[in-house]
Image (spheres, grey):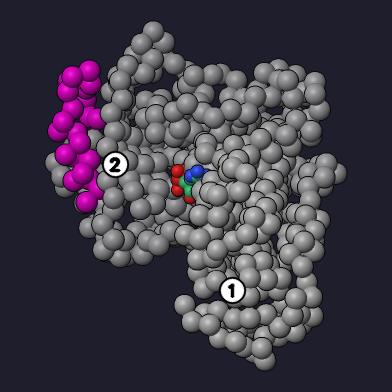
Amino acid sequence: MSVITATSAVPPLHSPRSTPRPRVAMMVRSSNAVSAASILTKLHSDCATPLPLLRQVSHAMAADMRAGLAADGASDLKMILSFVDSLPTGDENGLYYALDLGGTNFRVMRVQLGGKEGRVVATEFDQVTIPHELMFATSEELFDFIASKLAKFVEKEGGKFESRRGRTREVGFTFSFAVKQTSINSGVLIKWTKGFAVSGTEGRDVVACLNEAMGRQGLNMRVSALVNDTVGALAGARYWDDNVMVAVILGTGTNASYVERVDNIPKLHAPKSAGGSTIINTEWGAFSRGLPLTEFDREMDAASINPGQQIFEKTISGMYLGEIVRRVLHRMAEDATLFGDSIPEKLQMPFSLRTPDICTMQQDSSKDLEVVGSILYDVAGVNSKLESRKIVVDVCETIAKRGGRLAGAGIVGILQKMEGDSKGAVFGKRTVVAMDGGLYEHYPEYRRHLQDAVTELLGPEISKNIIVQHSKDGSGIGAALLAATNSIYPH
Ligand code: ADP
Ligand code: MG
């Protein structure tokens, strides 16, 4: 690390934040006029989520859901039809497979279902990393690779796993990229994301791509259900508990799905008498109204690959919380000498501080905040004093609290929308919200803030009926179950 004593290169403190800041490895601030405490005080007030604000957020979420159900393109929320209209009942029987392609890994799984008595008799899974070059390959090459790994996995079937003679094996395919679903077992890829740039898939039915590749491998197997990961999570949780009505994933990104009555979906143009329910994938990460955003959020958004989009996701999900904290700390280092006279080089690197780091720092109960000190040293390359460490923990808490509480308000928005259409059917009885994803699972403070917001918004009576809980099985078994409920064979 080199030190540049750059007194003249630093813009005055009152300059607008849009002034480009010099990109030097390390520099010395122009003045000490701003204290970290005052930046922190402003952060507290900008991130505040008092009850009236949470109410507005939940109302806006409910209103945006209605708009998205009325017509495509009418809302931030796409409210995508999942074509899942038969949820698992517990009667599902037999051997089913699930394949989850969501990012750099894909998972294959087999599930032996034994009906109401046997339930999930056995499961086995395998995880494979997609070789980096395949992310830039042709569609055939990618799907051939997936099908070949699936074929290897199927070869090892045995023991408790038994496929019925003469039957084609059925797969539930969880595919977490933007798809325009056209039926329970077909959907056209709109766009690759998360670093994938595979040629020849966009505009094609991804189920056909996989079925064809399985054919080329000589596998007697077909996709019976194409599912979004939140839809899989909902189906998986519902299998154990009929009261599950909503599923929320809080991981790298975030999304939610819920059970909706068909006659509440105007854009479906179904006959009024249609009846029945289906699962709607809200794509709620795109929600944006009434959120308490800071200059740090705006700067992070502007520097992102999708500026102006996925604002709710950028405020509440795992990919971003650490980065928001880093931006605050960077400002405190720059304007208020939080870490002494210089700005640590590593702290200037986007995404160098990750959400698991801020979570770990919040768990530090030592007197000297030693864990905070060592993370700051490892991640930001700074030797910190106790006073600074306390401020860092406060920043982590502020960002996690805002995220958790806003996620809670989003959940209440979904519940209010459902309750508004069917008085008493949600708030008047036990209703379960199934939660999944690494952020929810591993960040206890975040989880607590989420629950607090739900309880505050619903009040003590109603919140007794609303159970927000980590779902046992996640989306893997859910996808296999949806393959079962949508089997080509009679149940
Ligand atoms: P994905 O969303 O990519 O399918 P996961 O549901 O496993 O994957 O979530 C992974 C995300 O969860 C990470 O990107 C991270 O943001 C968050 N996460 C993982 N571990 C922790 C932790 N200990 N504390 C806070 N967040 C965590
Ligand atoms: Mg996932």
Pick whichever, 28 or 324, lies toward us: 28
> Which quarter of the picture shows residue 409?
top right
Kind of residue at disc 2: Gln
Q: Would you name the residue on which mark 2 appears?
A: 127
Which secondary structure, mark 2?
A: strand
Please state the total of marks drawn on the protein image.
2
Image: 340 above or below 184: below
The percent position of residue 58, horizontal first and vertical second, equals 75, 42
Magenta residues, start to end: 145-171
Image height of 424 relative to 107, above or below: above
Q: Which residue occupies 79% across, 34% down? A: 457
Q: Residue furthest right?
A: 52
Q: Position of residue 372 (x, y in %)?
A: 56, 52
Please, what is the three-letter code of the amino acid marked with disc 1? Ile
Instruction: Give yes or no for residue 170 being in the magenta stretch.
Output: yes
Residue 37 lies left or right of residue 388; in this view the side is right
SS at circle 1: loop
* Residue linked to disc 1: 343
User: Whole-percent x and y of residue 343?
Assistant: 59, 74
Q: Is residue 221 above or below residue 140?
A: above
For the residue pair 260 and 255, the one nearer the viewer reads as 255
Say whether disc 1 or disc 2 marks the residue closer to the N-terminus. 2
Viewed as shown, does residue 6 lie left or right of 170? right
Q: Which residue lies furthest to the top in this view?
A: 117
Q: How crowded is mark 1: few (under 14 residues within 10 Å), some or many (20 or more)?
A: many
Question: Is residue 406 within the magenta segment?
Answer: no
Asked if one can make out residue 264 in the rendered structure from this viewpoint, the answer is no
Q: Can residue 448 be seen in this view?
A: yes
Residue shown at 77% from the left, 61% from the top: 37
Q: How far apart are marks 1 and 2 (CA)?
A: 41 Å
